[in-house]
Amino acid sequence: MKWVYAAYGAAWAIHIVYLLILTRGYQRLREDVRDLDRS
Amino acid sequence: MRSFFPIFALITLALLSYGLYQALVAAPREATMGDAQRIFYYHVPSAWTAFLCFFANLVASIWYLATRNPKVDAIALSTAEVGVVFTTVVLVTGPIWAKPIWGIWWTWDARLTSTLVLWLIYVSYLLLRRYSTAGQNPVLASVLAIFGAADVVFVYMAIRWFRTQHPQPVIGGGEGSGLDPRMWNALLVNWLGFLALAGLVIYLRYRLERLRQQVEEAHAMKAIAGTTRSTR
């Protein structure tokens, strides 16, 4: 079963990393919007 | 859509959890490959989901070329990016499955190589969009996407057209192919779960891209306003 767990773990790691990248992108854009509102 | 989002997220989570149970517990142990065959329930649905994402990207790219609508461009980008994520899952889970069964992580057969080429085409699509400074970015990317989609057909047909290390089709492969009904069930539940996940993430990525387009537009308007003031 170790190969199955490795494959499933890798699949979820890829999805989670992508979601984290999206979250980071969203935070950066929010900062950008705030800067635009201030200026 | 916003109020429906949490409900859809919960449905997706339920489907993925049930899919995991089906794949690890309910589906029977395959006779020749043993438990390693259970990787199939993540590997194959991820590939099918990636193909659908790239098909949606093709439709959006053609639509964009016809209309030049930025909303359609945001759909094209979102579907390509999520398609790359699912293809990455395919390219990672495949070798983890191959090692205990074939004794090797990778071989340059038609299916594996064309899948890697597919991944490279769409990664270059995303890099083109990210780093090119030309104003015609989405147009160039849309043209590349149309060629990229042709490789999807090649990847799908590779195991039918060539003798490959990769197994011949188990589903729709003609006489002697097929699956135990419990395996079918596990496969379909996982595919539904991954489709729901893809839909959810495409929606999030679409919202993000629309926000980025609006911020870029606001920056441009601000720059124009600044230039107009300084020339007076």
Image (cartoon, rainbow, N blue to C red):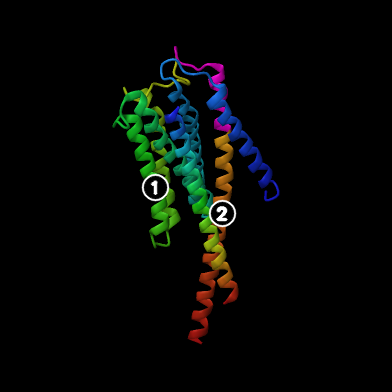
Total marks shown come to 2
Rendered residue at 55%/46% (across/down):
B202
Classify residue A16 as left or right of residue B33.
Answer: right
Q: Residue furthest top?
A: B176
Taking depth in this image into account, of B173 and A33 the one nearest to the observer is: A33
Taking depth in this image into account, of B132 and B41 the one nearest to the observer is: B41
> Real-space Cα distance between discs 2 and 1?
21 Å
Mark 2 is on which residue type?
Answer: Lys
Q: Quadrant of residue B21?
A: top right
Rendered residue at 39%/53% (across/down):
B127
- Numbered badge on residue B30: none
Q: Position of residue A24 (x, y in %)?
A: 51, 57
Rendered residue at 44%/49% (across/down):
B142
Q: Which residue is mark 1?
A: B123
Q: Quadrant of residue B69?
A: bottom right
Taking depth in this image into account, of B219 and A35 the one nearest to the observer is: A35
Mark 1 is on which residue type?
Answer: Val
Which structural element holds mark 1? helix
Is residue B221 visible from the viewing direction of this image? yes
Q: Which residues are magenta?
A: B175-192
Q: Which residue is mark 2?
A: B71
Q: Position of residue A17 (x, y in %)?
A: 48, 48
Circle 2 residues within 10 Å: few <14, some 14–19, many ≥20: some
Is residue B66 visible from the viewing direction of this image? no
